[in-house]
Amino acid sequence: MTATPMRKATPGVPASPETSVTALPVTPRPGRERLAALRGFVTRQVVPPAAVVAVLLLIWQVAFYGGGSALPTPLQVWEEASELILHPFYVNGSQDIGLGWRVLTSLERVFYGFGLAAVVGVLMGAVIGQSDWMMRGLDPIFQVLRTVPPLAWLPISLAAFMDSRPSAIFVIFITSIWPIIINTAAGVRAIPQDYRNVAAVLRLNQVEFFCKIMVPAAAPYIFSGLRIGIGLAWLAIVAAEMLTGGVGIGFFIWDAWNSSRLSDIIVALIYIGLVGFVLDRLVGWIGRVVSRGTAV
């Protein structure tokens, strides 16, 4: 029988048959956390759309490959319009400029038209939403006017302003204002009565009620209308520029069609789609900041 050796006792420390080691918690490094977050973002947000785009390009290439096809393939677009893709801000003359400058010119018009529509639409929607009579009387008119196509307003605007630039801005304004008015009025009508009672108790005037109660409470509705409006504004400027001329992206598409440059048109369409996507996300981000995450 073998005797278990006894561990010599240390003065001041109680004897223990076993000694346990406690592992300290491992603190993750900030660099690793950021790398993991970036990897997760790329996996969730970048890889899926990139894979879908690659598949669509492959289908496009296979479907229109051959000499008898009227539409160019992706490789043909790259060969014929690579200058527009790689150098969007070149300037070779007053009319020979890159698509980047053309997009900025169109965005300037959108800024004026949509900005005016946002201010007027929110104010009108706030006033209309507080009156049942005005809501019942004006809502059918708004529903009819919002279905009018942008190009249908162009002859009237040209006759009124006698100039292409203000006419294009008016077309943007009149096309994008209706969803802003309708959504703002709906948001104002959806404000809980408790909020109005609090405003009455605090004796808020109309300006204070608008800034402190109405806008924060109706923000999800307002920014839903603004997101719809910015999309319509971008559609309207492209359509209007096809007929009014200038150096905008819409006139570039019309001029490329007259010159049978289909590859240039396809590149311009990609520019238009990307800019519209960025505008929608920008308005949505501003809405989430203003409404503290309640707006979509």
Image: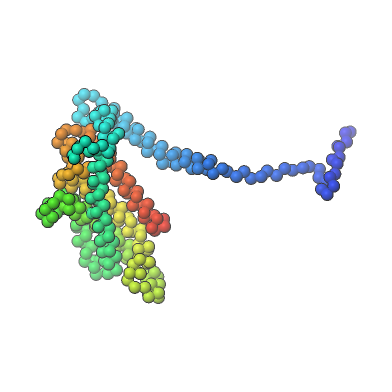
> In this rendering, is residue 209 above or below 36?
below
- Residue 96 x, y percent position in the rendering: 20, 37
- Residue 138 x, y percent position in the rendering: 21, 64
Residue 182, visible in the rendered structure: no
- The residue depicted at 30 percent of the width and 34 percent of the height is 86
Q: Quadrant of residue 190?
A: bottom left
- The residue depicted at 23 percent of the width and 46 percent of the height is 106
> In this rendering, is residue 123 above or below 1?
below
- Residue 21 x, y percent position in the rendering: 72, 42
Residue 224, visible in the rendered structure: yes
What is the total number of numbered labels drawn onto the structure image?
0
Is 70 on the left or on the right of 289, as rendered?
left
- The residue depicted at 47 percent of the width and 41 percent of the height is 38
Q: How is the image coloured?
A: rainbow
- The residue depicted at 30 percent of the width and 56 percent of the height is 225
Quadrant (top left/top right/bottom left/bottom right) for the N terminus: top right
Furthest residue in direction top, as rendered: 67
In the image shown, does 137 or 153 lie closer to the viewer? 153
Q: Quadrant of residue 58?
A: top left
- Residue 130 x, y percent position in the rendering: 29, 68
> In this rendering, is residue 222 above or below 239?
below
